Image (cartoon, rainbow, N blue to C red):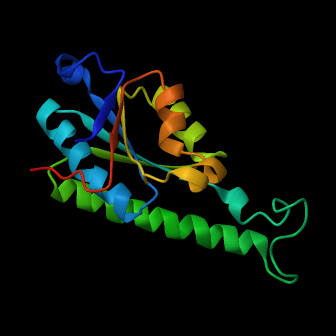
Amino acid sequence: MPGLARSGGLRRLSMFSRILLATDFSENARQAYAWAAELARVHGGTLVLVHALESDVVNPGTVYGGPFLPEGVDYQALLAEFKQSASGALEAAKGELEEKGAGQVETHLIDGGKAWRVIIDAAKELNCSIIVLATHGRGGLAHLLLGSTAERVVRGAHVPVLTVHEGDRMS
């Protein structure tokens, strides 16, 4: 079963008119699509699909204070390709959600730093009443080194957060 943090129980589900679904396009994230689509369908809500584009991943000055990309690589062209790829993946995800009966789906590609912060800020700015996101379930050293986007969202969000774990499937 997915986890519903800060919900006050199922009674509040009818209040979910704008459902933010955060995606990184991973297989885990795609498992959360069915849950978000069902919330939108049942409650007549709008699904707000958000991808946090962490462009600093390809920024030449972000790795240990020095250049990450080999000399001669056009950073701006690489970033444009990165954005175009993410935009295409968002449109494909939108189509998949519509096929699942999600109804109205908005897409937002947001370049603004760390994914957890983008998700929390987007929920506020886009007037969302719940956040749905997958957890990768990393534990131990991987969790300590990489952190947990889902955990940070649950701790920092001003709205309920539905976390979908690997293997959580709609019946």
Q: Nearer the viewer, residue 102 or 134?
A: 134
Q: Nearer the viewer, residue 20 or 10?
A: 10
What percent of the width, then of the height, locates residue 22?
42, 46
Q: Is residue 94 rendered to the left or right of residue 76?
A: left
Indicate whether 154 appears above or below 71: above
In what quadrant of the picture does the N terminus appear?
Answer: top left
What percent of the width, then of the height, locates residue 15?
24, 20
Q: Residue furthest bottom?
A: 72
Residue lying at 34% horizontally and 65% vertically, measured from the top left: 92
Could you tell me if residue 150 is visible in this image?
Answer: yes
Q: Residue furthest front?
A: 140
Which picture quadrant has residue 43? top left
What percent of the width, then of the height, locates residue 143?
57, 50
Q: Is residue 152 rendered to the left or right of residue 57?
A: left
Which picture quadrant has residue 94? bottom left
Residue lying at 67% horizontally and 46% vertically, measured from the top left: 113
